[in-house]
Amino acid sequence: MTSATQIARDVKSGATSAEAELEKSLAAVRARNEELNVFLYVDEEGARAQARAVDARVKNGEPLGALAGVPIALKDNLCQRGVPTTCSSRILEGWRPPYSATVVERVLAAGAVALGKTNLDEFAMGSSTETSAFGPTRNPLDPSRVPGGSSGGSAAAVAANMTTISLGSDTGGSIRQPAALCGLVGMKPTYGLVSRYGLVAFASSLDQIGPFAKNVEDAALLLEVIAGHDPMDSTSLPEASPSLVAHVNDGVKGKRVGLVRELIEGADDEVVEAVSRAAAALREAGAEIVELSIPETRLGLSAYYLLAPAEASSNLARFDGVRYGLRVDAEDVTAMNEATRTLGFGAEVKRRIMLGTYALSAGYYDAYYGQALKVRTQMISAFRSAYQKVDLLLGATTPSVAFKFGEKSDDPMAMYLSDVFTIPTNLAGEAALSVPFGVGETGLPIGVQLLGPGRSEASLFAAARVLEIARAS
Amino acid sequence: MALPEGWEMVVGLEVHAELRTATKLFCGCANMFGDDPNTNICPVCLGLPGSLPVLNERAVELAMALGFALHCTVAPSTFHRKNYFYPDMPKDFQISQYDLPINSGGYLDLLDGSRVGIERAHMEEDTGKSTHLGGTGRLQGADRSLIDYNRSGVPLVEIVSAPDIRNAAQARAYASELRGILIATGASDGRMEEGSMRMDANVSVRRPHEPYGTRCEIKNLNSLRSLVRAIEFEALRQIEVLEAGGSIRQETRHWDENRGETSTMRFKEEAEDYRYFREPDLVDLAPSEEWQARVQSGLGPMPAQRRDELASLFEGDAPGESIALAVDLDLDRFVRAANAAGVDLVLALNRATNELAASETGVDALSEEAFCETLLMEQRGELSATQTKTVLAELLAHGGEPKVIAKAKGFEQLSEDSLATTIDGLISAHPQEWGRYVEGDDKLTQFFIGQVMKLTKGQANGKAVVEVLVERRARRH
């Protein structure tokens, strides 16, 4: 399959058409969606109308956007007007949002064709897509294994060549971890770079939308389209979208890259080796590699599992059966709320709502939520001082390659640990990406993680591009 | 009403006022009372999944203006989420201010010279409005509930007083003065009947100089009358309990307007744990010095200053109650304008606090110029008192030119000339009565006034009639 960059170029030149590209995508979906459970909803009609509109613009010689005619998959926690949005939860069954997320508006305005909505862990709570109320997504590279999560469907859509690009959301690693497990490039941008308006919130202070792609250039292209200030999101950074594609080949010459001890600690040997090879490749390309330690990152997981559930417990309160989605009737409104939430939410969501409610409760706030906030502050300053010494950081994305179904789903702690390397970036509000670098014993891809300070996306893509080239040679 | 000997009440008020913005606190929907249900709504104020709040700048300005008027410290502030389930609250949390409110530490001086501390005046969003049909008529046990989300997200300011109030009259004076300030700052229209200003009262009783007693909070008092009645009932109830050897349990109580009593809603132990935490979807609010200065310098005079200004126009004792009423109803500007135009101060104040105050349609249609002109016509005897009231009523209802209205009503015949002609006609028609009057029988004055009134259908100015009669008699001598 060609790249998104190539499709857009060919659509513009007339070498292909948006509708032809859409048909290819639909054929790929028909071939494997039943087996892999990637898309919860394929908006064939809507996508066809969008593709025809792009082709009409080509025919009329009208200006075209950066993603002209490129099919894209959307994680099903992104609102698209009139298209079912479930967050893979029964509680939102049947809900069609009356408005679109800012990122959806932006990709459509850039000429992308929205193929449909992809599976995720329920409300993005999970690391394997196994908590989806509509069944797990299978890893296209090995259907006996998970694609990672929570954005497993969006990763699988690209890995299965159903689309060249997709959008996911990353609260504690939900883009980077599935990108690693599916052999893709996936980025969690700086908090505030991409508008969250229309992203169904899991943990508002940590959530960030970002791209999946097969290559660095496509990921940069998609992020460029969706980034930039949005007046509908108060936490949106004031600046316009950064120039990313233009800097993809800037290289790493003269850059200092810190290899972080804690970000490979406990990872499988093959993962640690891949990270070392990546360090060597960066050094080869002119970067200086510095080994360093950021002990605060060890506290990330604990802090995250207080902060994220606390925010989630409040964000998910609105799913009460009153206004939309599921309603289970009962004798009075309180009983209706209870019955609806009991049936509508899965076990993992309930676990986190209870955790979060407890962490915020009178008498426990200081010990749990308050303490976690302090850890978060420490994390921010620890990263800040690290970035005074180096430009970027390097580590593993995830401790292992894609694991088998059921391997961790009965043990929440084991599952939570698969995000141990990705969580610190969300807590610090900074940027990081996962880029494939080598394969493990089973032939499954290994991802390495590059981390940078706020607004370092261009440098991160440039470094990832160096690894992409090194991998190919 | 006095409390039994040896008891004192301690009251603090929490007043919620809707801010007079064009749009809601966190979205662009109209902030409009009385529209069809669920017409001013959008994904944000319906709390739809994925929607996010964006703070209304105008609401911040109005809140700051109120803060300055209440002598508060205006400081950088934050928003929190107050979490609890309620069907008319679409997110099942309310965005409010918690440990860092925009305004804190002010005071309000009352007419009686007392000062009530203001602990804070913070911003928050209003909820939707529920209507419960059938069954109990309350949320639990109604057959159905209807929810109008037009009010959801309307900006509120909550003004929390210190427990400085010691009787119901003072509570009333505080609420009334606060309402005047809300109106004077433009922060709110203060319309209690529309729910733009709602009050909760914290009431406790104690023996003077003893520590505060246990308080009870009475919710949703929607008029000054309810406020006074509820506080008095509650204080007496608590005294009764204590004198019988009982103790007060901290609780939230409901005021029943029809039965004139409070009753238990929930005890403190049953109170919700709101699990407050910082609203992650909003950024900190830190109004610049420059912005604050602009808001502060834009403030007009507050009611106390306006009362003083009006009182200073009177030589000797000023009619305090009428002045307070005029300022309260924002009618003092009419009185000042009329006074400047040469209208008698007492006349102007009377017309403002009677005719203007009684207007059911407000005073928007009446210009200060038209008011002055009408009163000058009255003062010159061109209009009788009755005619003046008719002209003012017309001006209040539809606006217009006083002279044109007077003419259209047929009042112009009562100009001095036409009045004199009428009286001369009466003199010719009643020579005997006129003769007795000329000889000094002043009782006949009433006869002639009566005749003039009959002919003019009651529209003549009695004082002007007497003036003409006196003048005609003088000519005969």
Image (spheres, rainbow, N blue to C red):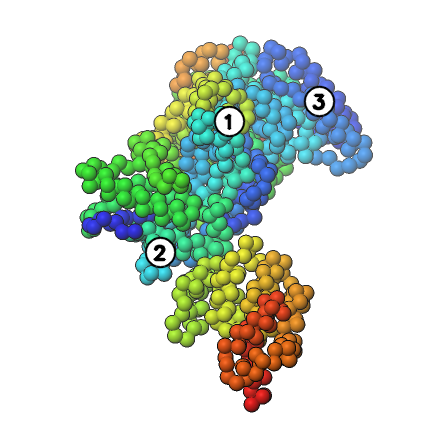
Q: Amino acid at mark 2?
A: Tyr
The kind of secondary structure element at disc 1 is strand
Residue lying farthest bottom?
B477
Q: Residue at x 52, y 85 (%)?
A: B439
Task: Confirm whether circles 2 and 3 share one chain.
Answer: no
Residue lying farthest front?
B432
Residue B60 visible in the current orientation: no
Q: Residue at x 75, y 30 (%)?
A: A53
Mark 2 lies on residue: B107
Name the chain letter of the residue that bears numbered label 3. A
Name the side, left or right, on which A82 lies relative to B283. right
Looking at this view, is A251 or A189 the one in front? A189
**Crowd rating for badge 2 (residues with CA inside 10 Å; few <14, some 14–19, many 20+):** some
| Mark 1 or mark 3, whichever is nearer to me | 1
Mark 3 lies on residue: A45
Q: Residue at x 40, y 44 (%)?
A: B221
Q: Amino acid at mark 3?
A: Glu
**Crowd rating for badge 3 (residues with CA inside 10 Å; few <14, some 14–19, many 20+):** few
Task: Confirm whether circles 2 and 1 share one chain.
Answer: yes
Residue A458 location (% of width, % of height): 57, 36
Which mark is first along the chain, 1 or 2?
Answer: 2
**Crowd rating for badge 1 (residues with CA inside 10 Å; few <14, some 14–19, many 20+):** some
Residue A256 location (% of width, % of height): 48, 36
Query: Which numbered circle lies on residue B144?
Result: 1
Residue B4 location (% of width, % of height): 23, 48
Name the chain letter of the residue that bears numbered label 2. B
Name the chain letter of the residue that bears numbered label 1. B
